[in-house]
Image (spheres, helix red, strand yellow):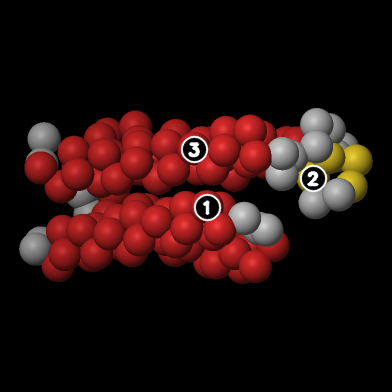
Amino acid sequence: MEDVQLILSGLWISLMLTYLLGDVLRIFAGDFVAGEMEGNKATQGMWMVAAIIMLIPIVMVSMSLILPHPANGWINIIVSIFLFLFNLSGVRTYPSYFDRFLIVVGLVFNVLIVWYAWNWIGAV
């Protein structure tokens, strides 16, 4: 197994834990109302979309370890850029400084994932 695969997997774990930390802190800070998303009553469809988005880094932990090179690198780049843009678009919607800070930390993890994957592909 390539060292880059382990690094990518570790970065996805770090990203996932950063998302989770933000959610936990948001609950304890009172920036969260059970059953609502952005002030609206959440539907089953909204929860499903949230589950899919949050599942992406979890799946990428395993995919980074088992996908073959160079497809592995390209999948990591594409998925990480998607999450980078998704999170960047939502930075202003978070009211707390800790949330914005954690989103920026997550964006840094996305950049690192793209950088490692890109350099790995370039090493072919």
Can residue 17 be seen in this snapshot? Answer: yes
Specify the quadrant that holds the C terminus.
bottom left
Q: Name the secondary structure under disc 3.
A: helix
Please name the amino acid that badge 2 sits on: Met
Can residue 63 be seen in this snapshot? Answer: no
**Label 1 belongs to which residue?**
98
Disc 2: CA contacts within 10 A as few (<14), some (14-19) or many (>=20): some
Report if the CB atoms under discs 2 and 3 are less than 8 Å apart.
Answer: no
**Label 3 belongs to which residue?**
21
Q: Name the secondary structure under disc 1.
A: helix
Of mark 3 and mark 1, the one earlier in the sequence is 3
**Label 2 belongs to which residue?**
37
Q: Residue at x 86, y 49 (%)?
A: 39
Report if the CB atoms under discs 2 and 1 are less than 8 Å apart.
Answer: no
CA gap, disc 2 and disc 3: 18 Å
- Decide which of 41, 70 is in the foreground and name it: 41
Please name the amino acid that badge 3 sits on: Leu
Disc 1: CA contacts within 10 A as few (<14), some (14-19) or many (>=20): some
Of mark 2 and mark 1, the one earlier in the sequence is 2
Q: In the image, which is nearer the foreground, mark 2 or mark 1?
A: 1
CA gap, disc 3 and disc 1: 10 Å
Q: Is residue 107 left or right of residue 118?
A: right
Q: In the image, which is nearer the foreground, mark 2 or mark 3?
A: 3
Q: Answer with the quarter of the image where residue 35 lies.
A: top right
Q: Position of residue 60 (x, y in %)?
A: 39, 40
